[in-house]
Image (cartoon, rainbow, N blue to C red):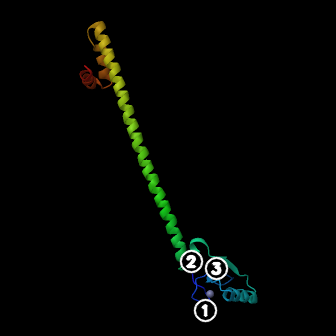
Amino acid sequence: MKCSQDGCPRNATHRYTWPGRTEAGICSDPTHMGALQDVSKALGFELELIPLTGVLAGFQGDATAGTRLALDVAFAQLDAKRATLVAQVAELAKELHNAGRLHREGLRRATLEALSKCCSLEYDLTGDTDTASGFARDIGLEDELGAFEESTA
Ligand SMILES: [Zn+2]
């Protein structure tokens, strides 16, 4: 935002408004800001001077471009945060998946071990494994039980 005084090349340090006028900028030159205050007093208008601070003060263009720049920076920061969160969610999902797989594998192995023990006890007592094999068949682990017993034999 440039100073609104005729021929002044400086950037505004304040923006100002008064009734019926669109917002404009004014520099810190005391004759420029003073002239503005004199005019508003003479006309009986209440002058509102707003300092241009932060991103707006450091920006060499107009206030609209400065605001856009500030918004761009804010959006870039939000985007970076979102990317971090997305990565964290993906990492958590992977950990859950692994935990679930280990859990299932652990349960499956414990079940196969228990069935295998049942088979050998039943065989020792009765000479066959009909009951324990029936349990394994009922829960769909008959083939796996066979493979498990071979692998541990
Ligand atoms: Zn000026």
Q: Which mark is residue 63?
A: 2
- Residue 101: where, in percent of width, then height? 36, 35
Query: Is 121 in front, or is 60?
Result: 60
Tell me the kind of residue under disc 1. Asp
Mark 3 — residue?
A: 14
Q: Quadrant of residue 19?
A: bottom right
Q: Is residue 10 above or below residue 145?
A: below
Seen in the image, is 122 located left or right of residue 41? left
Tell me the kind of residue under disc 3. His
Task: Quadrant for the C terminus, please.
Answer: top left
* CA distance separating discs 3 and 2: 10 Å
* CA distance separating discs 3 and 1: 16 Å
The disc, 3 or 1, on the residue closer to the chain's N-terminal end is 1
Task: Quadrant for the N terminus, please.
Answer: bottom right
How crowded pointer 2 is (Cα within 10 Å; few <14, some 14-19, many 20+) is rated as many
Q: Are marks 3 and 1 in contact (CB under 8 Å)?
A: no
Residue drawn at (30%, 13%) of the image: 120
Q: Is residue 24 above or below residue 101?
A: below
Q: Secondary structure at mark 2?
A: helix
* CA distance separating discs 2 and 1: 19 Å
The disc, 3 or 2, on the residue closer to the chain's N-terminal end is 3
How crowded pointer 1 is (Cα within 10 Å; few <14, some 14-19, many 20+) is rated as few
Mark 1 — residue?
A: 6
> Does any atom of ligand 1 lie closer than 8 Å to the CB of label 1?
no
- Residue 61: where, in percent of width, then height? 53, 80
- Residue 71: where, in percent of width, then height? 52, 68
Ligand 1 visible in quadrant: bottom right
